[in-house]
Image (cartoon, rainbow, N blue to C red):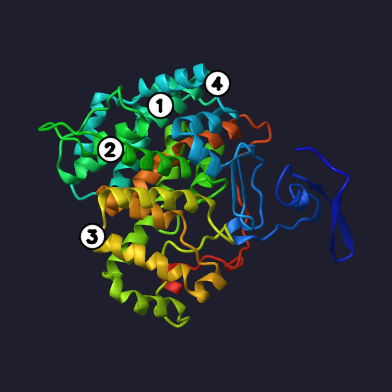
């Protein structure tokens, strides 16, 4: 980021202040207000940080008006169609597409780190059987710092690298173990002869009693889900990871913080909320009723999985995810699953309705990913853990970038105080 000749002039009373303006490689210009408080004695006010850039980054760019999502400059639709998750991981981590030998070495490294410390199994058994898998993941990932002391020094580049590889490799194992524990089945160890997505499906659905073969269509759909959720710029969970990192916290604590933030239904829990909505609708014949309710501004009901806060025309990830949804549903069928049948009919009804077209309430990535995961046999409680393992590489890439930034400071937002002013303490007998 470099200074330009452009400035913004801010006038407060009789005083004026010149604020530098930076021009990014893509996106709107940014006004630098870092010295505003020192010069003018005022803060800016931006709840939700909707108009505030908290960092500069070279990883991901989103243009919500155009429906663009770029990772290191590469469009997400090209990556989802031509690449695969671990190659996208390499791209996010290192900034370029790897050569064949680089990718082979990276995949080998990740594969060799997929097992977790055997004593960590005891952590899972400390949770109640009905614990939400996200609660389990927050605890277990946070506890990794107690087992991997050789990768917690954030000032050591080699340790940062090892921590990055371990988190990407072990997150599917941890998520699968959380699932197995929740349904009372034995843990399934990772297999080095399977690729990343197939290995995760095997750990989730295999049992010791019989052989389990991963269908390549399901493995490809799973890999696309991972790829399409790998990073999404400065969203709530990524900002949480960056804020935790700014304090100097170890990488496992930072990623655990990101998982905790992702758990919220307005963020990573959106696809779970979408499936719960479909269960509420129940059957396709009730769709007109719920369409009417969604249009009624006095009705609190909202269609989950439609529209997006950032994308104003369409979600570029949804186009690719729809293709995977169609492939999975063709493979597994929807005839005996009313939820999936309802999803297909709701999609048709919403896309054909002028109201939703005018409001730009298009099916988003959460709608289709939820449909796919439901068809695969995952309970809704596993949707957000799968999102978490997908997003881990994005969190790590942002974490690494921030640590390398010479401008990094501990995050410390300001506030607009609206409380009481100075009051004297009154002894209890005089109140």
Q: Nearer the viewer, mark 2 or mark 4?
A: 2
Badge 2 crowding class, 10 Å Cα cut-off, few under 14, some 14 to 19, many 20 or more, is few
Q: Which residue is mark 3?
A: 335
- Indicate left or right for 5 with 334 as reference: right
Residue shown at the point (45%, 34%) measured from the top left? 84
Residue shown at the point (49%, 22%) measured from the top left? 103
Between the residue at mark 2 and the residue at mark 1, the CA separation in whole angstroms equals 27 Å
The N terminus lies in quadrant: top right
Extreme residue in the front direction: 330
- Under circle 3, the secondary element is loop
Between disc 2 and disc 4, whose residue precedes?
4
Q: Relative to residue 114, is residue 381 depicted above or below?
A: below
Q: Which residue is mark 4?
A: 99
Q: Which residue is mark 2?
A: 215
Query: Which sits in the foreground, 357 or 91?
Result: 357
Between disc 1 and disc 4, whose residue precedes?
4
- Under circle 2, the secondary element is loop
The x and y percentages for residue 206 are: 19, 35
- Cβ atoms under marks 4 and 3 closer than 8 Å: no
The x and y percentages for residue 201 are: 28, 37
- Under circle 1, the secondary element is helix
């Amino acid at each position: 980021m470099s200074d330009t000749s452009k400035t913004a002039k801010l006038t407060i009373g009789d005083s004026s202040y010149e604020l530098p303006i930076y021009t990014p490689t893509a996106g709107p210009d940014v006004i630098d207000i870092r010295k505003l408080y020192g010069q003018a004695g005022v803060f800016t006010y931006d709840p939700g940080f909707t108009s505030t850039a908290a960092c500069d980054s070279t990883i991901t760019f989103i243009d919500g008006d155009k429906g663009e999502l770029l990772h290191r400059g590469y469009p997400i639709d090209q990556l989802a169609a031509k690449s695969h998750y671990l190659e996208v991981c390499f791209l996010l981590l290192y900034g370029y597409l790897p050569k064949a030998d680089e990718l082979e070495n990276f995949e080998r490294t990740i594969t060799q780190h997929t097992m977790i410390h055997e004593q960590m199994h005891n952590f899972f058994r400390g949770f109640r059987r009905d614990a939400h898998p996200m609660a389990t993941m927050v605890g277990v990932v946070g506890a990794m710092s107690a087992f991997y002391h050789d990768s917690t020094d954030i000032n050591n580049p080699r340790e940062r690298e090892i921590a990055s590889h371990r988190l990407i490799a072990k997150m599917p194992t941890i998520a699968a173990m959380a699932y197995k524990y929740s349904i009372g089945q034995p843990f399934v160890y990772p297999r080095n002869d399977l690729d990343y997505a197939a290995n995760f499906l095997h750990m989730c659905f295999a049992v010791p009693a019989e052989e389990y073969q991963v269908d390549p269509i399901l493995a490809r759909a799973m890999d696309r889900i991972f790829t399409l959720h790998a990073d999404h710029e400065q969203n709530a969970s990524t900002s949480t990871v960056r804020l935790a990192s700014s304090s100097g916290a170890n990488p496992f604590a930072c990623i655990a913080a990101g998982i905790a933030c992702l758990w919220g239904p307005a963020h990573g829990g959106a696809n779970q909320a979408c499936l719960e909505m479909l269960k509420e609708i129940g059957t396709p014949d009730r769709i007109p009723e719920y369409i009417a309710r969604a249009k009624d501004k006095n009705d609190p009901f909202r269609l989950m999985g439609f529209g997006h806060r950032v994308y104003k025309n369409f979600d570029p990830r949804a186009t690719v995810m729809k293709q995977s949804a169609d492939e999975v549903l063709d493979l597994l069928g929807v005839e005996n699953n009313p939820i999936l049948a309802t999803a297909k009919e709701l999609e048709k009804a919403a896309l054909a309705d002028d109201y939703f077209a005018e409001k730009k309430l298009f099916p988003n990535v959460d709608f289709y990913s939820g449909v796919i995961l439901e068809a695969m046999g995952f309970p809704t409680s596993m949707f957000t853990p799968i999102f978490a393992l997908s997003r881990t590489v994005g969190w790590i890439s942002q974490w690494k970038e921030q640590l390398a930034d010479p401008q990094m400071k501990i995050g410390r937002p300001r506030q607009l105080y609206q409380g009481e002013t100075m009051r004297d303490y009154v002894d209890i007998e005089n109140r």
